[in-house]
């Protein structure tokens, strides 16, 4: 097919996509090859668990496509000293239930749980 015809076809396809009305799904189903062994975000031990949890929970920080650490729930962050970090949470965060994250939200319990040695968290177990 000549380049001019390909460009015309591509333009028609793209313009047709713009005319499709947005659809809001009431339910999303995702298939995985294994059941989750735990739903504890701090205690995932395999790729399936991590993938499932990452689709349900956000972190203070994440990695971008270049594997650079970037804010996720945090608006910004800085290291104050060797043992102290300050995270400013971005405004407008809501839970999946629709409720707003309170401005008094404290990440310390979550961070403390992640820092515990594995045996204190308990062994991963099936939720099914």
Image (cartoon, helix red, strand yellow):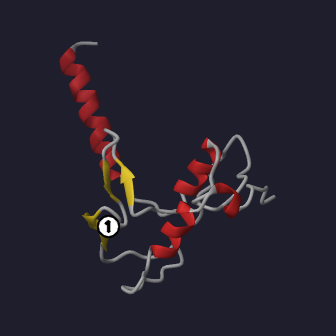
Q: Residue 105: x percent and y percent?
A: 42, 82
Give the residue displayed 30% in from the left and 44% down from the top.
68
- Asked where in the image residue 67 lies, by quadrant, the reply is top left
Q: In the image shown, does 23 or 128 lie closer to the viewer?
A: 128
Left or right, 73 with reference to 15: right
Count numbered badges in the picture: 1
Image quarter (top left, top right, bottom left or bottom right) of the C terminus: bottom right
- Asked where in the image residue 124 lies, by quadrant, the reply is bottom right
Give the residue displayed 46% in from the left and 74% down from the top.
108
Left or right, 69 with reference to 102: left
- Above or below residue 57? Residue 37 is above
Q: Residue 8: x percent and y percent?
A: 22, 28
- The residue indicated by pointer 1 is 85
Q: Hey, which residue is sitting farthest left in the picture?
A: 4
Q: In the image shown, does 14 or 83 lie closer to the viewer?
A: 83
Image quarter (top left, top right, bottom left or bottom right) of the N terminus: top left
Q: In the image shown, does 35 or 97 lie closer to the viewer?
A: 35
Q: Hey, which residue is sitting farthest top in the picture?
A: 1
The answer, for residue 3, to whether it is visible in the render is yes
Give the residue displayed 61% in from the left and 58% down from the top.
117
The answer, for residue 21, to whether it is visible in the render is no
Give the residue displayed 32% in from the left and 67% down from the top.
85
Q: For the residue labelled by badge 1, is the local secondary structure a helix, a strand or a loop? A: strand
Q: Residue 88: x percent and y percent?
A: 29, 73
- Above or below residue 110? Residue 33 is above
- Above or below residue 96? Residue 70 is above
- Asked where in the image residue 92 lies, by quadrant, the reply is bottom left
């Amino acid at each position: 097919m000549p380049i001019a015809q390909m460009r015309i076809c591509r333009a028609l396809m793209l313009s047709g996509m713009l005319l499709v009305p947005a659809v809001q799904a009431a339910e999303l189903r995702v298939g995985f090859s294994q059941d989750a062994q735990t739903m504890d975000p701090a205690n995932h031990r395999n790729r399936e668990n991590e993938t499932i949890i990452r689709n349900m929970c956000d972190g203070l920080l994440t990695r971008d496509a270049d594997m650079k650490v970037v804010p996720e729930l945090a608006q910004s962050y800085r290291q104050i000293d060797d043992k102290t970090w300050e995270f400013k949470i971005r405004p407008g965060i809501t839970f999946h239930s629709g409720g707003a994250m309170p401005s008094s939200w404290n990440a310390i319990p979550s961070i403390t749980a992640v820092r515990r040695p594995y045996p204190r968290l308990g062994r991963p177990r099936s939720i099914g």
